[in-house]
Image (cartoon, helix red, strand yellow):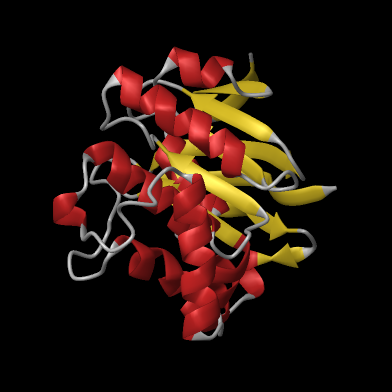
Amino acid sequence: MSILSAEGVSKDYPSPAGPISVLRDLSFELNAGDRVAIVGSSGAGKSTLLNILGGLEHPTAGQVLLGDTDLKLLTEAALCQWRNAHLGFVFQFHHLMPEFSAVEAVAMPARIAGESPKAALSGAEELLVRLGLSERLHHRPSRLSGGERQRVAIARALINRPACLLMDEPTGNLDPRTAEDVMTLLNEVVYQDTAFAIVTHDPNIAAAAQRRYQLVDGQLTLL
């Protein structure tokens, strides 16, 4: 069953010398439970592709569908609600707010989705415990290591049981051993029917995916 798909997606950026084409008539599909890695050289457009799949940027041409929903047809408010309910994002940098503890940060998307404070905090605590952070629930980011912060970011992305998880170099700021530990834990806690696409430069992480794609000249090639 298709969770998220791109159909004929192109993306151009303006420049003084004329439009710069980053993605060209690209098509891509994630089905329930898929584990996909996307590799490519710096500047190839990998982050742009994830941003478009997540509705953070709009394609110049083509469409992105969540199931049967065309993201172009959603208002900005509806798109924000859709992202919170159906997508999880993990980036290279954790983007944790310094004033919130780990459990408060993870609970926030659930609170935005309408869960009660008690239910949201309970779900957040459960995820953090599964990610090995039972002793760090009430620590703010300044008191967490880099690997711990990224595990908090992963828990935050999973709190609403998203249909799809999009990850842009989630271990790029970590040492190799910590990166391996984080990915092992991620695979343990991701729900079975949640699809994920990960952009990575790490060949070990890419090799662990079910499918690997390389982004070259604006197109995805299956490796």
Compared to residue 170, the image places residue 61 above or below, namely below
131 or 26, nearer to the observer: 131
Q: Position of residue 27 (x, y in %)?
A: 68, 38
What is the count of numbered marks? Answer: 0
172 or 146, nearer to the observer: 146
Q: Position of residue 210 (x, y in %)?
A: 68, 23
User: In the image as oriented, which residue stretches furthest toward the front?
Assistant: 135
Q: Position of residue 4 (x, y in %)?
A: 70, 51
Name which quarter of the figure residue 158 lies in. bottom right
Residue at left 72%, top 41%? 29
Is 85 left or right of 122, judged from the image as shown? right
Compared to residue 104, the image places residue 172 above or below, namely above
Residue at left 63%, top 60%? 161
Which of the image's four quarters has the C terminus? top right
Compared to residue 179, the image places residue 73 above or below, namely below
Whether residue 21 appears in this view of the structure is no
User: In the image as oriented, which residue stretches furthest toward the left?
Assistant: 142
Q: Position of residue 5 (x, y in %)?
A: 70, 48
Compared to residue 176, the image places residue 76 above or below, namely below
Residue at left 61%, top 44%? 190
Whether residue 23 appears in this view of the structure is yes
Name which quarter of the figure residue 70 lies in. bottom right
Residue at left 32%, top 18%? 176
